[in-house]
Amino acid sequence: MATTSTPPTPKSPRQQASSVERTKGPSGLEKVVLREARGFSAEVHLYGGQVTSWKNDRGDELLFVSNKATFKPPKAIRGGIPICFPQFGTHGNLEKHGFARNRFWAIDDNPPPFPESTAVKTFVDLILKPSEEDLKIWPHSFEFRLRVALGPGGDLVLISRIRNTNTDGRPFSFTFAYHTYFSVSDISEVRIEGLETLDYIDYLRGKERFTEQGDAIVFESEVDKIYLDAPAKIAIIDHEKKRTFVLRKDGLPDAVLWNPWDKKTKNMQDFGDEEYKHMLCVEPAAVEMPITLKPGEEWKGKMELSAVPSSYCSGQLDPDKEHLMALILSGALAGADAAS
Ligand code: BG6
């Protein structure tokens, strides 16, 4: 963990110093709470290595977690940012979306340094290694290091480093996703920018390949698609909230869009009947082309999220400009972007 300083008498989120605190949730599960001086915060459960909360400086929750989420192993927590590894989806004998999301991760007190310098001081490092039982279902030795960082401007950064530690010379292949559940005002008010004209695989139409035709991606029914070779930046625009989530990804070529809508929701015990209206999963992923690592090799996949006020400039959304303005106004520009 990074800093552990907490003032003796915190009065309001805006007056707190930045801190990293290990604590327990109401479920009894251990979590780490990251707080930034201006009131931004994030929570990471050791169960699943899963981010389960990300709040802005007004205390608004930016991620969706179902009111029916159980927080009871071995079920994965429904919401936040589950990690899908060593597979996305269902193939062979491995459980759906792999096992990383329902294993207990450990705090990594001494991770290997990142090659780049870091300006962000509020972060936690976690590690997952396979147990004897895991090796029976996926016979590969690995070290999965996850850094979750909260920037001074409230940006949330997740960096995964996965290393093949097999000692018998065997490579392994995996697929991966940051299964990010965004909280939205109403799904009918949401538009995605960045995925237009891309090819996608539609899980609702026999995993066939199509090309996106619409000018903008909006939501009127169930969606379960993998966009291939998606750009590094995707915007999730919530018109009602006048908020844009800017998602930046690196090392993760694909992007999954998922909303179960009303019918599928009925079969999900840990998801309320009406909750599909208030969430959308946009998941940076490596699915179409599995990643292969030889022993000793390491892969890195990064996701960076920011939430900025939406605005239009001659009909053109420019979240970058908005983000820059927000950072300048909050005085957070110095060192706001480099979490790794
Ligand atoms: C999405 C998949 O990423 O996750 C969907 O594309 C799947 O097919 C959804 O239904 C939820 O999966 P789970 O296992 O968390 O219910």
Image: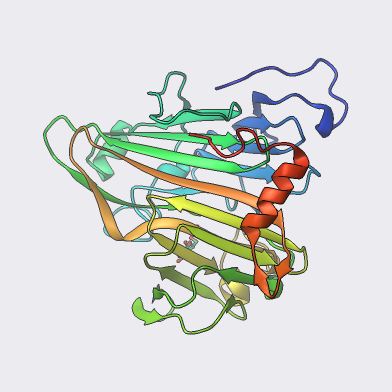
Query: Up-down: is 213 above or below 303?
Result: below
Count of marks, rendered view: 0
- In the displayed structure, would residue 98 be above or below residue 111? below
Which residue is depicted at the point 51% across and 29% down?
118
Residue extending farthest front: 314
Horizontal side of residue 305 vs 169, given as left or right: right
Residue 25 occupies which quadrant of the picture? top right
Left or right side of 9 for 298: left
Q: Nearer the viewer, residue 198 or 46?
A: 198
Outermost residue toward the left?
A: 169
Q: Quadrant of residue 154?
A: top right
Coloring basis for residues:
rainbow
- Name which residue lies at 58% across and 62% down: 235
57 is higher (above) or lower (below) than 246: above
Q: Quadrant of the N terminus?
A: top right
**Which of the 4 image quarters holds residue 27?**
top right
Vertical comparison of 30 with 264: above or below: above
Report the residue at 29% width, 50% height from top.
174
The foreground one among 56 and 215 is 215
Provide residue 175's location: percent of width, then percent of height: 33, 53
| Residue 180 seen in the current view | no
Where residue 113 appears, x then y in whole percent? 40, 24
Q: Residue furthest bottom?
A: 213
For residue 258, say whether it is visible. Answer: yes
- In the rendered image, residue 275, in percent from the top left (x then y), is placed at 68, 65
Q: Position of residue 211 (x, y in %)?
A: 40, 81
Depth check: 51 or 119 in front?
A: 119
Left or right: where does residue 95 sit relative to residue 83?
left
